[in-house]
């Protein structure tokens, strides 16, 4: 099997600080956690920003500036900036920092969907900040908007204008069909890096049969022109990643996707999750890709062409 890319999603915009004292929120914390993940073996660092004072999801370039230069100075790992940001943000807000900093890689959500986080409320005994509970509760009546026009805009602004490559986040099988639409239009060039996302209420459940169906569908739509990775929220994180690795795919872990390292045990760092999945994939006979190898596999423009 080919070298395996381990992506680590450092903080995200889903969990609230009250759920774990280990969730990085300040620039210093995000940088330190990202560098620790890279040292543990993460090839790609998938990044979001938060407001340092209270951990609220942030699109502000100044909050991104609190950690991007430190990460670039401290590791050769690939920086992947979100363009999804948070479902509460407008598209212009979501793109403000990626446009400013011109990363090698961006995530791109391939369709609109329900993105329901409100079931987490019942598992939180005490809210540390006043924004947290209303933020989660509002997702009961919220659509995460990613229309074809939105997708085209991101492809143009980040791909055509700034040379970024994409992690295409696919929460449902129809998102593969949408990607094929843009491939047929000539808006996307291979190799395509697909991220199959499981476990978000509104998207696919983390079921092995669904993963095999997605793989067969991607084979039919994209032939040999794609790579796939798997992330699963919560307790399904490691089982679904292990299955992906055994199938020849790539994997994603990180505190954005799960706050735990085992049943009832909070992960104390992103690095701990990277070490766990690295041990598993190496036991399966897979060698972890270096950042240089990942850049070659994905056709990235290079660390020297970013703006941070």
Image: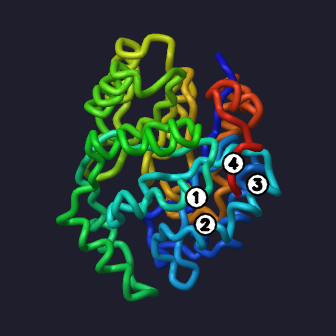
Cα–Cα gap, marks 1 and 4? 10 Å
Mark 1 in CB contact with mark 2 (< 8 angstroms): yes
Residue corresponding to mark 3: 72
Mark 3 in CB contact with mark 4 (< 8 angstroms): yes
Cα–Cα gap, marks 2 and 4? 14 Å
Checking the image for residue 64, the label placed there is 2
Say whether disc 3 or disc 4 marks the residue closer to the N-terminus: 3
SS category of the residue bearing label 2: helix
Say whether disc 3 or disc 1 marks the residue closer to the N-terminus: 3
Frontmost residue, 131 versus 280? 131
Residue corresponding to mark 1: 100
Residue corresponding to mark 4: 306
Mark 3, mark 4: which one is toward the viewer?
4
Cα–Cα gap, marks 3 and 1? 15 Å
Location of residue 122 in the rendering, given as x and y in whole percent from the top left corner: 30, 74
Left or right: 13, with 213 as reference point = right
Cα–Cα gap, marks 1 and 2? 10 Å
* Badge 4: residue crowd in 10 Å (few <14, some 14–19, many ≥20): some
Residue in the image at 43% along x and 39% along y: 155
* Badge 3: residue crowd in 10 Å (few <14, some 14–19, many ≥20): some
Say whether disc 2 or disc 4 marks the residue closer to the N-terminus: 2
SS category of the residue bearing label 3: helix
Mark 3 in CB contact with mark 1 (< 8 angstroms): no
Location of residue 102 in the rendering, given as x and y in whole percent from the top left corner: 61, 50
């Amino acid at each position: 099997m080919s070298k395996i890319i381990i992506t680590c999603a450092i903080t995200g915009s889903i969990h609230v600080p009250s759920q774990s004292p280990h969730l990085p929120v300040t620039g210093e914390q995000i940088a330190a956690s990202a560098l620790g993940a890279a040292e543990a073996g993460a090839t790609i660092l998938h990044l979001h920003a938060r407001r340092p004072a209270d951990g609220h999801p942030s699109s502000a370039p100044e909050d991104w500036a609190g950690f991007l230069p430190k990460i670039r100075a401290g590791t050769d790992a690939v920086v992947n900036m979100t363009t999804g940001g948070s479902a509460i943000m407008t598209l212009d807000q979501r793109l403000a920092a990626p446009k400013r900093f011109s990363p090698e890689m961006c995530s791109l959500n391939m369709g609109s969907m329900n993105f329901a986080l409100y079931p987490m409320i019942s598992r939180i005994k005490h809210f540390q900040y006043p924004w947290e509970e209303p933020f989660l509760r509002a997702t009961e009546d919220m659509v995460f908007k990613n229309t074809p026009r939105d997708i085209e805009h991101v492809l143009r602004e980040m791909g055509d204008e700034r040379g970024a490559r994409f992690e295409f986040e696919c929460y449902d099988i129809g998102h593969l069909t949408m990607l094929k639409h843009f491939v047929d239009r000539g808006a996307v060039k291979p190799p395509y890096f697909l991220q199959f996302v499981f476990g978000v209420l509104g998207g696919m459940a983390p079921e092995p049969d669904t993963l095999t169906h997605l793989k067969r569908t991607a084979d039919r739509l994209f032939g040999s022109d794609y790579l796939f990775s798997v992330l699963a929220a919560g307790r399904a994180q490691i089982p679904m990643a292990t299955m992906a690795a055994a199938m020849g795919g790539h994997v994603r872990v990180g505190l954005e996707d799960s706050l735990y390292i085992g049943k009832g045990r909070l992960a104390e760092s992103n690095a701990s999750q990277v070490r766990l999945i690295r041990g598993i994939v190496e036991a399966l006979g897979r060698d972890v890709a270096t950042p240089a190898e990942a850049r070659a596999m994905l056709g990235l423009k290079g660390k020297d062409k970013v703006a941070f």
